[in-house]
Image (tube, grey):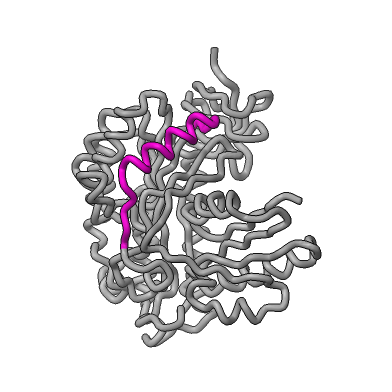
């Protein structure tokens, strides 16, 4: 029997699932959990129950952030055979998700910040940077196994230091120098306060660094950002995007945004809506606020659930309209792209794409001829 992984949450989890899979016994189903919201925890429990129904003879192993925070709850589930907590202070380089030609390689885990809504630092502990040689060797192995694009991932990858000698920009620079066969390098979520000058310079001059950033912005109102204990204000986010686009005009921006944070006024919510335009956000991950146990935000005055839901829906709607306009604007253009699986892939700026008759791993310039509700359609140019 094969080993199956069911992964919830972030790209780091996908990378770590691959490492867990390699060490698991045949017939195991690994459920790698997420704790970023109450809904993510609920989905984890739901995935475990579904796995038991679909694989009644399998050994179900539960692990990940939700399990790390509350192992007894998962041990009490009759569907779970084993609960595994981990020592994140001594992480191994993890890489995975190569079935789509894109491989996620971990460079860091843990977090030294204490955002008032977040429990991930409790689950994963303080920030730990992986040594550069280990990261370089992991990337080289993934390329040797057929990966066409590498995504560097972690909890807070902009803080990498020590073994990488100089931060995320220097790490990317060294990887691209040491591995000339690395054709495409992409970055997972970035903290806007920690994007260094070396990374900006690399965006300006290195075409192998993909022109898309996903920023951990969370909100567009200064008072709410302070209550979240974020380290930036709205003007900092806007200025960073201006600097990025000044050096790489084709760069696109995604962002994580929370709707309905405690004490959020209508004016504060409107400031987040305005941020979509001011930062040119074309890929918004919108989270309705979810009070997590043992966090300061859980003790703040909460908004009514129906109001949180409504504000999240409105933010998603406006973000969706911006994204739709962006995709419309690409029709008729020529975009460099990578096909990942099933004739589907992404442009370098991370627009989803379908090219009929294309093959897994194919790269090149695509003439965009149209679009559907959620992706572009095109043909490779000669």
Q: Residue at x 66, y 55 (%)?
A: 25
Question: In front here: 81 or 97?
Answer: 81
Residue 143 covered by magenta stretch? yes
Quadrant for the C terminus in the image: top right
Residue at the extreme top of the image, as rendered: 382
* Above or below 344: residue 90: below
Q: Position of residue 102 (x, y in %)?
A: 52, 38
Q: Quadrant of residue 345?
A: top right
Q: Residue at x 57, y 30 (%)?
A: 339
Q: Residue at x 36, y 47 (%)?
A: 280
* Above or below 191: residue 304: below
* Above or below 273: residue 291: below
Residue 312 visible, this orientation: no
Q: Position of residue 194 (x, y in %)?
A: 24, 53
> How many labels, in total?
0
The stretch of residues the image draws in magenta is 127-148
Q: Residue at x 47, y 49 (%)?
A: 94
Q: Position of residue 45 (x, y in %)?
A: 64, 72
Q: Is residue 74 left or right of residue 192?
A: right
Question: In front here: 138 or 299?
Answer: 138
Q: Position of residue 306 (x, y in %)?
A: 54, 79
Residue 130 visible, this orientation: yes
Q: Quadrant of residue 24?
A: bottom right
* Above or below 90: residue 150: above
């Amino acid at each position: 029997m094969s080993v199956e992984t069911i992964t919830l949450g972030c790209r780091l989890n996908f990378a770590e699932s691959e490492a867990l899979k390699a060490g698991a016994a045949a017939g195991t189903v690994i459920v790698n959990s997420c704790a970023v919201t109450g809904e993510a925890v609920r989905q984890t429990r739901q995935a475990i129950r579904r796995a038991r129904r679909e694989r009644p003879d399998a050994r179900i192993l539960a692990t990940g952030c939700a399990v790390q925070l509350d192992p007894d709850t998962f041990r009490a589930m009759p569907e779970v055979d084993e609960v595994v907590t981990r020592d994140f202070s001594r992480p191994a380089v993890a890489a995975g998700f190569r079935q789509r030609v894109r491989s996620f390689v971990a460079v860091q885990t843990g977090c030294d910040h204490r955002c008032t809504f977040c429990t991930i630092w409790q689950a994963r502990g303080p920030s730990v940077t992986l040594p550069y040689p280990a990261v370089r060797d992991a990337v080289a192995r993934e390329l040797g196994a057929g990966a066409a694009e590498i995504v560097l991932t972690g909890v807070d990858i902009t803080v990498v230091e020590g073994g990488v000698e100089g931060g995320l920009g220097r790490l990317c620079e060294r990887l691209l120098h040491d591995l000339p066969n690395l054709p495409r390098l992409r970055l997972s979520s970035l903290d806007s306060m920690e994007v260094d000058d070396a990374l900006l310079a690399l965006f300006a001059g290195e075409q192998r660094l993909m022109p898309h950033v996903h920023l951990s912005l969370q909100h567009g109102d200064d008072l709410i950002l302070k209550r979240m204990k974020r380290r930036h204000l709205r003007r900092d986010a806007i200025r960073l995007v201006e600097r990025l686009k000044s050096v790489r005009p084709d760069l696109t921006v995604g962002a994580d945004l929370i709707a309905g944070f405690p004490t959020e006024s209508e004016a504060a919510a409107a400031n987040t809506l305005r941020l979509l335009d001011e930062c040119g956000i074309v890929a918004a991950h919108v989270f309705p606020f979810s009070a997590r146990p043992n966090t300061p935000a859980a003790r703040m005055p909460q908004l009514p659930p129906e109001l949180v839901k409504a504000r999240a829906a409105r933010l998603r709607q406006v973000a969706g309209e911006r994204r739709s306009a962006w995709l419309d604007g690409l029709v008729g253009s020529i975009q460099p792209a990578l096909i990942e699986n099933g004739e589907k892939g992404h442009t370098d700026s991370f627009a989803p794409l379908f090219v009929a008759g294309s093959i897994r791993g194919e790269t090149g310039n695509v003439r965009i001829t149209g679009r559907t509700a959620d992706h572009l359609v095109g043909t490779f140019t000669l």
